[in-house]
Image (cartoon, rainbow, N blue to C red):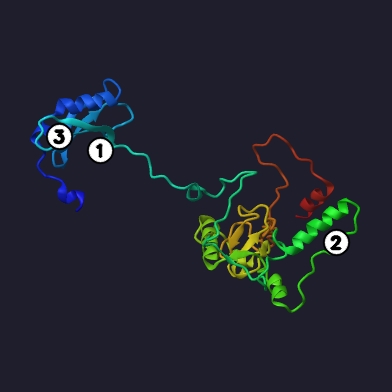
Amino acid sequence: MSAATTRSRTPDRLCAEAVDLARAAAEEAAAPGVVGEHVGLVSEGDRVVTHFFECKELGYRGWRWAATVARASRAKIVTVDEAVLLPGPDAVLAPEWVPWSERLRPGDMGPGDLLPTDADDRRLEPGCTGEDEPPPNSAVSPDMADLVEAEELEVTDAPPAKLAVAPSRGSIAAVAEELGMRRARVLSRYGLRVAADRWEEAFGSKTPMAQAAPAACVSCGFLVPIGGSLGQAFGVCANEFSPADGRVVSLAYGCGGHSEAAVMPRPPQPAPPVIDETRVDPFPLRPAPDSGSVPEVTDEETAELGHS
């Protein structure tokens, strides 16, 4: 039978009247002067009542001191069960604890920090090594053990041991190594999708920079292609003046540093001279009457006046 069915709805009269006893128990458990007014009671069961008192301690807004009292069957003496500090309906509580692996954000890691990857990480899936043995670059593979032994013998001036042999051409291990799959774990479809979403949000077609760009990165000469399935939608920017230099960008991203958008403006050309040959500009031989200067008359001008 659950506690809800055994709890009495009506508080026991003697336990409900034991407010002073409950206050004394709360004051004994709390610091002096932090137990406030009586704010209510609740029935916890047969002849069991919890009294609540206001908490005046700084930093505990909305919390209440709770003192539980009870009495035995057919007894008239009320005794104290416990006194604790409990949060009320509007109490200020600390946020729910989150494991460090979920609190970690990009950029939090520093030099020397280690981030172990869980065995069941959704971003990874087993790679294809072509055999059940560990891959050659694994620390537990026999080839690596032989390599370590060879290095030790070389230090001691002993004849070097046989190094690791590359997989035979055409084998599954050789094909997996050529495709970059000969690793203990590779990116899963989920890992590829979350990486693509993250890169698209940072340097995608919906960013303000891409909206104002003259062209997309897919036609830019500074775009360095990448391999794999992500190469169909992303590349690496190699323009030192671009805000995405050295970053993985979407092919639909763009900026003002597009290789084909930088057109040098033409130098200004002066206007051609205007030559008017339809009219004659008169040049008077004598100055105006109000001028005090007398121009000098040449022999040619005197001869011209004589003929006239």
Q: Is residue 202 above or below residue 65?
A: below
Tell me the residue that label 2 is attached to: 161
Tell me the residue that label 1 is attached to: 88
Residue 209 rendering spot, x and y as whole percentages: 54, 56
Tell me the residue that label 3 is attached to: 71
Q: Earlier in the sequence, mark 3 or mark 1?
A: 3
Of the two numbered discs 3 and 2 in the rendering, the one whose residue sits closer to the viewer: 3
- Residues 264 and 159: in front is 159
Q: Is residue 290 left or right of residue 45?
A: right
Q: Is residue 308 above or below residue 27?
A: below
Q: Earlier in the sequence, mark 3 or mark 2?
A: 3
Residue at the image point whose x is 8% and y is 35% from the top: 13
- Residues 19 and 258: in front is 19
User: Is label 3 in contact with label 1 (beta carbons under 8 Å)?
Assistant: no
User: Is label 3 in contact with label 2 (beta carbons under 8 Å)?
Assistant: no
Residue count near mark 2 (Cα–Cα under 10 Å), binned few <14, some 14–19, many ≥20 = some
Residue at the image point whose x is 77% and y is 51% from the top: 305
Residue count near mark 3 (Cα–Cα under 10 Å), binned few <14, some 14–19, many ≥20 = some
Disc 1 and disc 2: Cα gap in Å? 73 Å
Based on the displayed image, in which of its 4 quarters is residue 85 positioned? top left
